[in-house]
Amino acid sequence: MKIDCHVHSEMHSVHGEAVPFDCQMFLNDLRAAGLDGAALFSPNPLTCDKIPAEERMTNTLNMCKGEKTLFPLYWINPLEDDALEQVDMAVERGFLGFKMICSNYHPGCRESMDLLEKIASVNKPVLFHSGILWDGMNSANYNRPGNFEALLDVPKLRFCLAHVSWPWTDECIAVYGKFNNAYFRRPDLSCEMFIDVTPGTPRVYREEVFRHLLCSDYELRYNLMFGTDCSTDGYNVAWSKEWQKRDNELYAKFIENDVEDFKEHVYGKNFLRFLGLSDECPVKKIPMVGE
Ligand SMILES: [Zn+2]
């Protein structure tokens, strides 16, 4: 199964009036891009703060209803008073994971850490934005990959940094190596990091980033995921195909060992494992000092 792990769902009701979502057209667009499914993020809690959490949830759950290849992730803001209760509500109602964007908080702040502990305790993953963020706000210092080392203190958390943290891609790769090493050193904690290759990187940087990412000696076969940042307001088929084509050429160039297996993982298997929907237990090469 090939999945786009990074799609934003829009509010499909405006001022109380329903704007219908054409699910079949959306699925047809995914198929036209060579994909079988997608993760849909619920609407942004910061810009939709006047819309109650329940309604934001209902919006996205209705879009995914009855479709086995659409995976709803709930976009949660740790600064909302009832954030911890929202976790229970979201899981109870069928969300498979969470999305967070640190526009106005540090990922290691108390509210965020409490929320992440709660998310880990219900065995759900969280996908973060990372890198420079087009939110119109002063947020670079919240989104540097090094800040996410704080998550080492959240036992059993599965989290993902999107956009390879562009432009801090080297820092992102280094943090990934650190989490893999920590996994070995502290197996009781076993917090696991994934990287979502959703662009972020402008086209001209892609080869350079992938060269570093794929030739770093860190085992990435089981932790990279494909995404596009498209929206449910019309899936951009041409954009998705263009990035898949470019990425596939780079995988062919840089992956020496079983590139088809690598792509199967990046385009689907890793996301399913991230969600906890796969039995795969990959044995990863652990980066060690002096090796
Ligand atoms: Zn996004």
Image (cartoon, rainbow, N blue to C red):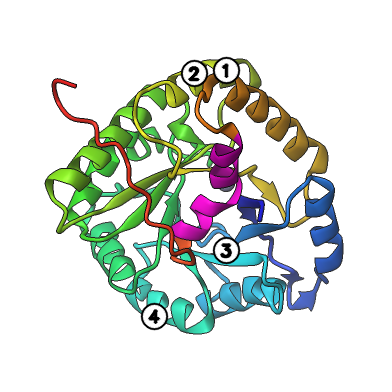
User: Cβ–Cβ below 8 Å for labels 4 and 3?
Assistant: no
Alpha carbon of mark 2 to alpha carbon of mark 4: how far? 41 Å
Residue designated by label 4: 88
The amino acid type found where label 1 is placed reads Glu
> In this rendering, is residue 244 above or below 110?
above
Q: Residues within 10 Å of mark 3 (few under 14, many from 20)?
A: few
Q: Position of residue 290 (x, y in %)?
A: 14, 20
**Which residue is located at x 77 percent, y 36 percent?**
241
- Circle number at residue 48: 3
The amino acid type found where label 3 is placed reads Cys
Label 3 beta carbon less than 8 Å to ligand 1: no
Assign the magenta stretch its main secondary structure: helix
> In this rendering, is residue 260 above or below 275?
above
**Which residue is located at x 19 percent, y 22 percent?**
291
Alpha carbon of mark 4 to alpha carbon of mark 3: how far? 20 Å
- Circle number at residue 65: none
- The segment highlighted magenta reads 260-274
Q: Is residue 24 left or right of residue 113?
A: right
- Who comes first in sequence, dot 3 or dot 1? 3
- Who comes first in sequence, dot 4 or dot 3? 3
Could one spot residue 201 in this view of the protein? yes
Q: Is residue 189 shown in magenta? A: no
User: Cβ–Cβ below 8 Å for labels 1 and 2?
Assistant: yes
Residue designated by label 1: 207
The amino acid type found where label 4 is placed reads Asp
